[in-house]
Amino acid sequence: MVTDPSNFRRPSLFVGGDFSDANYAAIRAILLARRGFDLGMYKDRCIKRRIAARIRGLGYSDPLPYLDRLREDEAEVDLLLGALSIHVSQFFRNPSTFFSLERQVLPELIQRVRALGRSELRLWSAGCAGGEEAYSLALLMAELVPVGMRVAILGSDVSEGVLAQARQGLFPPARLTEVPPHLLDRYFRAEGGQYRLADEVRRTVTFQRHDLLAAGDYPPADLILCRNVLIYFSREEQELILARFAAALTPGGVLVLGRAETLLGDNRRIFQAEWPTERIYRCLPDGHG
Ligand SMILES: C[S@@+](CC[C@H](N)C(=O)[O-])C[C@H]1O[C@@H](n2cnc3c(N)ncnc32)[C@H](O)[C@@H]1O
């Protein structure tokens, strides 16, 4: 018997652009209500593409049944957030960037701070997720910092949830694959299938909620790492954030962006690329606000 072709529902290729505003708003409302996470601050197109990929990956060709599932299935809320890779991080992510920081940037900043007669070096991981980036800096500084110099490391994020995790200093092994073995031996101990970072390193990092889009000055810093955060913002927002980083950096301060990020607009004149492949930029003296 030949099946009536009208019974066939051709799976359409559902892509991010097919999202109606109402469906996107419904997903945003669920994530906000259940996890306190507001998608509103992210570039719609980028996030919609990732949500569509998750929905397709589960075999749905239409967002509506997926929405029903999301309403009923708590685990799927976390799986979706994970798929958006909004909070993904790793210790020593892009190891060659940390190699440049360890060998060149940090020793040079230490010299600079000393020459200015200051006793404190200020480092800021902006958009720090679970703290892996801020703690990677802390691990490097535990080995580098000279006697008599204080290191203040700030890890900030818009999400209180990830900051609470960061403060615990407990990480699954998958986050630690790039930690150099001597640092792993010295500063981590196994605890129930995870790894606990030593108190002496944790103490050097302060975690604080900070929204890069909110009004107000950014905290002053000698080094700012803001990696894999700008990608979520519109071009205008990125330009504004970069200008505010320039104002927050001390003279000769250094900015590090993620591999998929770059300077935009007037910021190309304010910063000079020191290691372009590593996205390491120095703020020029007249770049300060
Ligand atoms: C992909 S993670 C990057 C983590 C880390 N910087 C790295 O590269 O491994 C992006 C982080 O940016 C944070 N974020 C998003 N919007 C933000 C905002 N407006 N202000 C501060 N942080 C924000 C997210 O909560 C998330 O933890």
Image (cartoon, rainbow, N blue to C red):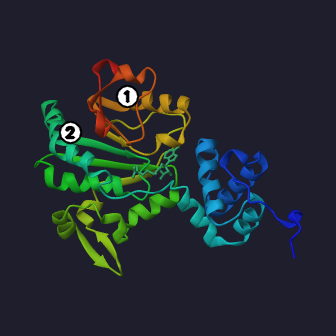
* Image quadrant in which the C terminus is located: top left
Q: What residue type is disc 1 on? A: Ala
Report the disc number at residue 105: 2
Q: Which is nearer the N-term, disc 2 or disc 1? A: 2
Task: Give the quarter of the image for residue 117.
Answer: top left
Name the residue: 29% across, 59% down: 203
Q: What residue type is disc 2 on? A: Val
Question: In the displayed structure, would residue 241 be above or below residue 6?
Answer: above
Residue density around tag 1, few if under 14, some if 14–19, many if 20 or more, within 10 Å? many
Looking at this view, is 69 or 5 the one in front? 5
Residue that extends furthest to the left in the rendered view of this protein: 147
Residue 23, position as x, y percentages in the image: 76, 52
Name the residue: 18% across, 47% down: 102
Task: Give the quarter of the image for residue 105.
Answer: top left
Residue density around tag 2, few if under 14, some if 14–19, many if 20 or more, within 10 Å? some
Name the residue: 72% across, 71% down: 72
66 relative position to 179: left or right: right
Question: In the displayed structure, would residue 206 be above or below residue 211?
Answer: below
Residue 108, position as x, y percentages in the image: 16, 36
Name the residue beneath numbered marker 1. 246
Looking at this view, is 249 or 173 the one in front? 173
Residue 37, position as x, y percentages in the image: 60, 55
* Image quadrant in which the N terminus is located: bottom right
- Asked whether the viewer can see residue 289, the reply is no
Looking at this view, is 121 or 15 the one in front? 15
